[in-house]
Amino acid sequence: MINKLKYIFAILLFWACTKKITKLEEYSNYPIKYGKTKIIHPENDFSITIPKNWEWKAEEYNNPQIILGMDIGATDSITKFTKIISIQKYKSLEKNMELLDEFKTIQKNIKKSSLMPIIIESGYTKNLKYDSYYIYQKLEGSNSIEMISFILKGKEKETFYSLTTSCQSEDNIETNFALMIKCIESFEIN
């Protein structure tokens, strides 16, 4: 009888250890409702659904690697905390053709830089409409910031999209990331 109990306990322990839920999955499954509006980049490159009361602006860059971009966000009028979604379409620095190669390049660059935030978790995700990898980072300091960046392949050769969500750790992180990830999940390349 004791051997059977040990066997059952070992199976339960193995099963519990094999199903690891990531923070990304937690945020993605967090229940949230909000008023939405769909926006389209002025060059009709992509669209995304955002909260109705958020502001957005198409960005121009003085960097030949960055093709186009958009910043979307809101600042809380009381706490002054800011929530931002930044989208950039860019050319691969190392002329990578494949998504996994670009992801590995980004990870390598993060590890080489002492200025980059701590990586909490990273990997492949099926949360978006496209194959993508994500990197969840935290920057410690007086106003610690957390960010989740998604990397996905563009339609043109050697192009990729970076979709980054960020907010202060102290600012209701679960709700804010759940909201921003819902927005990112609506991202569509035109």
Image: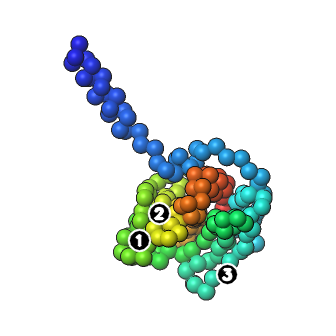
Separation of residues labelled 3 and 2 (CA atoms): 25 Å
Q: Which residue is farthest left?
A: 3
Residue 29: quarter of image: top right
Name above or below for residue 16 compared with residue 58.
above
Is disc 1 placed on a helix, strand or loop?
Answer: helix
Depth check: 101 or 114 in front? 114
* CA neighbours of label 2 inside 10 A, class few (<14), some (14 to 19), many (20+): some
Q: Who's the residue at 41% across and 39% down the image?
A: 19
Q: Is residue 112 left or right of residue 149?
A: left
Name above or below for residue 31 compared with residue 136.
above
Is disc 3 placed on a helix, strand or loop?
Answer: loop
Asked if the residues shown at circle 1 and circle 2 are in contact, with their CB atoms under 8 angstroms apart, the answer is yes
Q: Which residue is farthest top?
A: 1
Disc number lying in front (3 or 2): 2
Q: Is residue 31 left or right of residue 51?
A: left
In the image, what residue type sits under mark 1? Ile
* CA neighbours of label 1 inside 10 A, class few (<14), some (14 to 19), many (20+): some
